[in-house]
Amino acid sequence: MKRDSEKSAFYVFRRCLFLSKPFKTIQEQIELLHKRGLVISDYSKTKKYLLTNNYYSIINGYSKYFTDQHNNYIQGANFSEITYTYFYDKEIKYTFLKAILEAEKHIKSILAYVFSESYPTTPYFYLDYQNYDYKKNKRTVPFVIRQIVKIIDKHKSSRKSNSIQHYFNKHDDVPFWVIVDYLTFGDILAILKSLPLSLQDRIAKKSYSFISEHCTIKKTFTRDMLISFVENLAETRNVCAHDNRLYGFKCRNSLKYYPDLHDKHNIKNTDAKSSPYHTMIALQCFLSANEYAKLHNTLLSRFKDFSKHLHTLSIDFFLNELGFPPNWQQSNKLVH
């Protein structure tokens, strides 16, 4: 058995040696790009850029948009277009991330209020299995409680003063509205999905204060819609926070259809709703009109700037990669 394992490891090692690509100097990297038809206008500037930016991240991640089916660059494609494509991907991700962090703050606040309101005189109520829908979430609830216990244990004995330590020592209870600030968005989503349905309904209803700033409420914003929207916010947040490529990204699941919101943007029930554009639309349920206007206007500005640096492809190509329809800003008229 041991010999078979060693044999298998040896073959894997040999295969890795066979498949691995030899190291190339920056000069060799540039020559390879040039051979494939990429226009290099300034060799000195390109050398400096590749020295300070990972070749794999830039070329393997973003040059594919400028190549044909034979992996050669389309006529006129230049190195600066690739670098700007990379740069504006980062700028767009940062814009989304800032907005999602604001939404996260609001979601945490609403969750903390509704959950705490349900158990106003019970210390550490959030550590009690019975206060969750445990039957449907037998794995998630213990995980959530363990996470919270770890957070309390870590901070109550910290050398640096913090809010958990203060409430633990002074009041012998750490309110949930203190705990939420230490939870990740993933933890918040897990708690939200594990709550009794009646609490999920109340949290969804509290979102009306944001939704009403963007559209007239005629239909109920349901708990299923709430969880669907928060799931996609969390997925998009992770892509942005971990600096993965946003172009072409799709969430695992399509957003639940919310007529009051989606009809306003000409999005049908049968349409896929899993792109960054649909995440932007969903953010209207968790951002104020001013916060959403900032997101909208910043993205509009980034797209306009990006278009000035494109020569072989149009901005519409990249808007499509992000799920944005043509003239998207026309159906996103802001409430004043």
Image: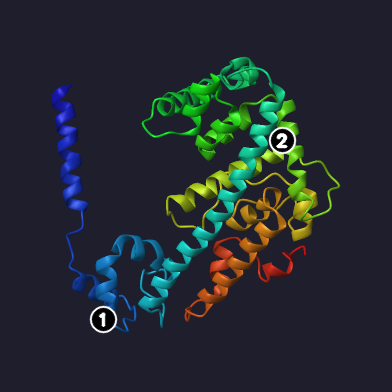
Total numbered circles: 2
Instruction: Pick whichever of labels 2 and 1 is earlier in the sequence.
Output: 1
Q: Is residue 312 left or right of residue 284?
A: left
How far from the left and from the top, in percent, is residue 272? 65, 52
Nearest the viewer among 83 and 146 is 146
Nearest the viewer among 191 and 245 is 191
Check the picture and name the quadrant holding the C terminus.
bottom right
Nearest the viewer among 4 and 111 is 111
How far from the left and from the top, in percent, is residue 65? 44, 68
The numbered mark at residue 203 is 2
Q: What element carries label 2?
A: helix
Check the picture and name the quadrant holding the N terminus.
top left
Picture layout, residue 103 above or below residue 152:
below
Nearest the viewer among 94 and 24 is 94
Q: Which residue is drawn at 27% across and 69% down?
A: 50
| Residue designated by label 1 | 43
Quarter holding residue 227: top right
Amino acid at circle 2: Ile
How far from the left and from the top, in percent, is residue 62? 40, 65
Q: Which residue lies furthest to the front in this view?
A: 170
